[in-house]
Image (cartoon, rainbow, N blue to C red):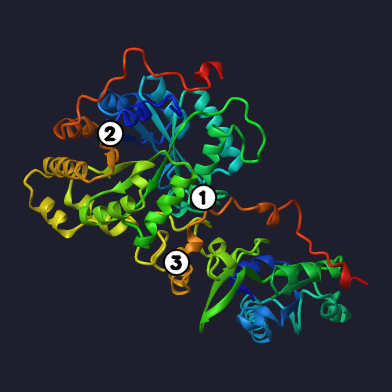
Amino acid sequence: MIVAERKSLDEILAMLQGCSRVLVVGCGTCVTVCMAGGEKEVGVLASLLRLAAQREGRTVEIGETTIERQCEWEFVDGLAPGIRGYDAVLSMGCGAGVQTIAQRFGGVRVLPALNTKFIGIPEKQGMWVEMCLGCGDCVLDRTGGICPVARCSKGLLNGPCGGSQGGKCEVSKDIDCAWQLIYDRLASLGRLDLLEAEFAPKDWSKNRDGGPRKVLREEVML
Amino acid sequence: MKSRSNLEWVLAAGHFALTGELGPPQSASAEVIRKKAEYYKGCVDAVNITDNQTAIVRMSSIASAAILAGLGLDPIMQMTCRDRNRIAIQSDILGAYALGVNNILCLTGDHQSFGNHPTSKNVYDLDSVQLIHMVRVMRDEKRFLSGDELKAEPRMLIGAAENPFADPFEYRVVRLAKKVAAGADFIQTQAVFDLPRFSRWMQMVRDRGLHERVYILAGVIPVKSARALEYMKNEVPGMSVPDELIRRMEAAGDPKEEGVRIAVETIQQLREVPGVAGIHLMPMMWEAIAPVVAERAGLLPRPALPAAGLAPASEGPPAGA
């Protein structure tokens, strides 16, 4: 899933300066699961915005709504009735959600309430970890299903650097060395031979190749 | 010969090699380089020039190495993958060679979070194995990484690092083998304080016959105090420092003298390990101690070039390139 985290209230209030009618829009997909921008979080943020206004003696109107997915037109279209009555839309979706709403509603100010962090998983309650960088050229078949591009601090492809010790990364003892994990997993699979061959330089044109990447599939086009 | 490197000549002639290390200043002062270079004249075969080590901004290794070459020393330009992509690295290698640099040490590079610009974006477009491979292709196949023809190739001796004290221990020799296959001519290791572990690693190196395909220079750091050792043990990732060594430094009346003694003893022990072709001395901003350690370890005088000088590299000297 896409994992996100809410911006600080101060940052959000600074963005909303001068707005008295704000629509807070949640998203029912990834950010609901990672507890950053679902219906509950919309309720909490809306209350915080009302309280902040009350403390400052301002009158505000904070609308609340949560749609199934902010990154799909059919759900974003549902915001059409009433959205233009607001000074700003505060999206609690990921970066794709914010931009989809902005693209659909020209002339409406759409602001991000979240910082979109990464593609990851909930490793345990209250903790999410990055798993994929979306590099566009998956190498997991050669690395035991553990991604060095996303999970090694240096994105190394030819094994651990000299800073790997006791299974931890040189950057912090809180970070597992991805290459130690890869080594252990390939050892358990009896496939350490995969680590003998040199990994050629990565083709980064599949990751950042001028402008947004596109996926075209003619067989499903209308 | 692959290059006009003095280090290559020393190693190829079968001498036990000695390299030093010089950290460029956090300033634009060439004078600092010249002063530190004095300590190394006649005392080592080649001098590593660090590349913004621990991610702290310093004078570039290329410029510092060129200054050193101008003083008649043989610089080993360190090149990390942290700050440059494949375009910049190839460009810098061409430039460094044109300025008289005949050795390169290919490194991954310390993560930027250690340094004084922790909010910077790292590059790591290549890793150290890929960097070694790229330099070898430039030198031996006269091609850029793209495959395009390279008319005047950089004839550099290619070095790499390996750390026998990092994990996974069993994998370290595999990584060394990858570096050798990619084209490394010589290896400098992380500083050896833990001789038993180094010896176990060297056994694995010999089991694979790697010591016959690459020159291995064992790293040695002369330390000034017990605190310095403790710092390395606890704060520097990938170091192994036995407690008994720390206790020995603590008990010493003159810790600096004890540090030199330990370095000298370590060098003598490393010299006995089959497959070790030389020592890489890393004085860590205590360059003045290098000649003292070299002298007392019996490594002076250094082998002098034959009167005729280095034979030109097969494709001609840099001036004609």
Mark 1 and mark 2 lie on one chain; the one further toward the N terminus is: 2
Residue B147 picture location, percent across and down: 66, 39
* Amino acid at the residue labelled 2: Leu
Query: Mark on residue B127?
Result: 1
Residue A16 picture location, percent across and down: 70, 68
What element does badge 1 sit on?
A: loop
- State the residue at coordinates (34%, 31%): B47
Task: Determine whether B284 is above or below A200 in the image.
Answer: above
Query: Mark on residue B18?
Result: 2
Q: Nearer the viewer, residue B315 or A151?
A: B315
Q: Nearer the viewer, residue B272 or B87?
A: B272
Residue A57 picture location, percent across and down: 66, 77
For this view, does B62 lie left or right of residue B163?
A: right
Residues under numbered marks 1 and 2 in contact, where contact means CB atoms less than 8 Å apart: no
What element does badge 2 sit on?
A: strand
- State the residue at coordinates (55%, 43%): B84
Q: Nearer the viewer, residue B53 or A20?
A: B53
Residues under labels 3 and 2: Cα distance? 34 Å
Q: Quadrant of residue B196?
A: bottom left
* Amino acid at the residue labelled 1: Asp
What element does badge 3 sit on?
A: helix
Q: Residue furthest right?
A: A222
For this view, does B191 lie left or right of residue A65?
A: left
- State the residue at coordinates (53%, 57%): A157
Label 3: which residue?
A: A183
Residues under numbered marks 3 and 2 in contact, where contact means CB atoms less than 8 Å apart: no
